[in-house]
Amino acid sequence: MRSLAAGPLNDVVVIDLTTMLAGPFATMVLGDLGADVIKVEPPHGDFIREQGPFAPDDELRAFGGYFQSVNRNKRSVVLDLTTEEGRASLLDLVAHADVVVENFRHGVMDRLGLSYERLQEKNPHLVYAAIRGFGDERTGSSPMRDWPAYDITVQAVSGLMEITGEPDRPPIKTGPGLGDTVPALFAVIGLLSAVHRARRDGVGGFVDVSMYDAMLAMCERAVYQHSYTGEVPTRQGNSHPLLCPFDVVPAADGWVSIAAPGNKHWQQLCAAIGRPELATDERTRDNVSRLANRDFTMSAVTAWTTTRTKDQIVETLGGKVPVAPVNTVEDIYADPHVRARNMLVEVDHPGVSHPLTIANSPIKFADAPPTHVRRAPLLGEHTDEVLAQFDNTTAAFQLEETR
């Protein structure tokens, strides 16, 4: 059996043509799993390189925290795909690759003469993955096919924002860019499935993930609620339309989440808050009853939580009832779970005298040590190295032109 020491995908070569967040997040996951991710950038680099945030003592400003976080474990090659030389160099790389990932708007690669069909001619085993706002005509042409899209765009159109926020208040997008990262994860699942098929059957394929589709799939509850009941779900804060208690409640010094919709957890919660009679009260004895009497149920819970600190609540309920404090990032840096799981990792940053911290991969393997996280690459840092490795003799740009 092949060793996992360098990651289970250590024999997979990925040509990364992505920018911004959705595509780079997908290829970052592949790089975290050991794939050789070759990030192909235009002469001016990925737009995100310039966006920060930058460390106060970073005078080089080759890239900021945003780029560092989602472009770790990659090598950077500069090619100008608007030139014949650049396209020829890309085709040479594709001939040796397992996967190509891009998140351009629909038709961009086709206009460059680098369509899926052209790349497949060069490498019949190639898996080509596209992440676009509204998908590709190869799998179903949307009337919005040519529209640009960002995280906030697809959070809005998919219905996620309609069910996020407080009643009678404007819709709210989620804090992190789920409109990008969720489609990225779906793309990783799809392309790894296609790689498996390519190695089994010798047939590559085109994997298409629409950001809109991915977010709609994530909002599955709203779909079946409407089908089964005819209702149009909307914002209801942190509570759940089908479960109770399942909410964020006030503590004396902040907020905690408590979820006890199952009868066993509800009974344990009732005992802990000194209200054992609620476990058999007809208004609260089961989840259906608690939903019908949500205000009464939650008032009993909050009467107890508001007189105690977050730490006191967690100490009482932890390990018995699903409970968690609403953490700030400072809390997360101090959390023993985060340390035990190695979820914060330090990386070098060019131009900065000390390591900086990014979130680590959550994917762990019991039979392999954690892989070393390599910092994000400088623009064109690996151009000569990669082109030589893949026996390419024509570089679109000399290395000094990329620095």
Image (tube, rainbow, N blue to C red):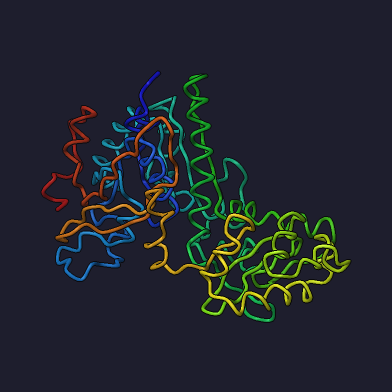
Name the foreground residue: 28 vs 90.
Answer: 28
Residue 256 quadrant: bottom right
* Residue furthest left as drawn: 400
Residue 74 quadrant: top left
- Is residue 5 shown above or below 80? above
In percent of width and height, residue 326 lies at: 52, 68
In percent of width and height, residue 185 lies at: 50, 46
Left or right, residue 40 beside residue 225:
left
- Is residue 192 shown above or below 283? above
For the point 57% across and 63% down, which residue is it? 155
Left or right, residue 400 beside residue 148:
left
- How many numbered marks are there? 0
Q: Quadrant of the N terminus?
A: top left
For the point 75% across and 59% down, which residue is it? 267
* Residue furthest right as drawn: 282
For the point 34% across and 55% down, which residue is it? 69
Name the foreground residue: 90 vs 297.
Answer: 297
For the point 57% across and 45% down, which residue is it? 137
In percent of width and height, residue 382 lies at: 20, 42
Name the foreground residue: 180 vs 128.
Answer: 180
